[in-house]
Image: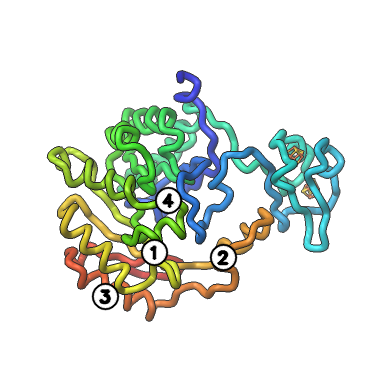
Amino acid sequence: MHEHRQQARIFSVQRMSTEDGPGIRTTVFFEGCSLACDWCHNPESIDRQPRAIWHGWKCMACDSCLAVCKRGAIERHEEGLRVDAQRCAGCGACSDACPTTAMEPKALVRDLESLLAEVARDRAYYDRSGGGVTVSGGEPTLQAPFVQAFLEACQAAGLHTTLDTCGQCGTEVLRSLISHADLVLYDLKLMDEDSHRQHTGHGLARILGNLEAIWAGDDAGSAPPLWIRTPLIPGVTATPAGVQAIGRFLAERLGDRVQRWELCAFNNLCQDKYQRLGLDWAYQGQASMGMPELEVLAQAARASGVEPSLVHMSGPGVQS
Ligand code: SF4
Ligand code: SF4
């Protein structure tokens, strides 16, 4: 247990983020996810299998990585290198041999102290902008002991903390983490059980149950405020009726615990990630969402019963 509190598998630390809570933030992306949304923009985060990732634009085709891989997991194809996820053991030999960092481990094992030191470096930006640190993923609740210790350490260091979760976890796990979070970003994608199961791999029981237990119960006032986030996925969540169903739930069950409801416009910027990982993406070729379509959905949200000023739009190029 002690070790789990001190180390975690993290696939990225993004500084200067303005998308994951208020102000300028550092977002820590934890590996592993409890859902499997078919539109996922961080496909490298879903499983927790160690493996290498190839970044074509940095590659100088020296073949050093192929020479050191004892498992024959790297293959050269017409379009570049491909790492066979089944054969790769995540040993890191190819990354060590690569002269340009074109071959990198999917995730790194990080210890709490070095991670805290890294996020604390931007304290001046947080202080000036009202920002702080966000734990995201993947799904950070899957590495709860470490995340709890990390959030606690951030708060002790005077840093504002935000937990970004899909809510697919046990209620007690969630309680243990939000006790050290100043804000919670909570994904709510669909209110239709069958559709949720079809597109994310799980039903809604835990996700809605956690919201009810923590933010609609007797002690709701002591829980941190919520920012609800809804990804607008063409043909799945991006319908006025779907958005309104979410809005009705927020208004009727969570009331003033919701500080903001963010509608996140679909974009296709992750297409090349899927190619790099050798995975197919169900939304390949789907155009990013434009402002007119987004406005229609925002209007539906504002008319759903929530306080209209809580509704915000986000996405590349969106000014809300
Ligand atoms: S991480 Fe190890 S097994 Fe995987 S591709 Fe690199 S050298 Fe081969
Ligand atoms: S070692 Fe690095 S630069 Fe050389 S072929 Fe492999 S990925 Fe490309």
- Helix, strand or loop at mark 4: loop
Report the mark closest to the observer, 4 or 2: 4
Q: Is residue 134 visible?
A: yes
Q: Which residue is mark 2?
A: 282
Q: Which residue is mark 4?
A: 202
| Quarter-of-image position of residue 263 | bottom left
Report the mark closest to the observer, 3 or 2: 2
Disc 3 versus disc 2: distance between alpha carbons?
28 Å
Q: Amino acid at mark 1?
A: Cys
Q: Which residue is mark 1?
A: 264
- Helix, strand or loop at mark 2: loop
- Helix, strand or loop at mark 3: helix
Circles 3 and 2, Cβ within 8 Å, touching? The answer is no
Nearer the N terminus, badge 3 or badge 1?
1
Nearer the N terminus, badge 1 or badge 2?
1
Nearer the N terminus, badge 1 or badge 4?
4
Quadrant in which ligand 1 is drawn: top right
Q: Amino acid at mark 3?
A: Gln
The image quadrant where one finds the C terminus is bottom left
Report the mark closest to the observer, 1 or 2: 2
Residue furthest to the top: 2
Q: Which residue is mark 3?
A: 299
Report the mark closest to the observer, 1 or 4: 4
- Helix, strand or loop at mark 1: strand
Disc 1 versus disc 4: distance between alpha carbons?
21 Å
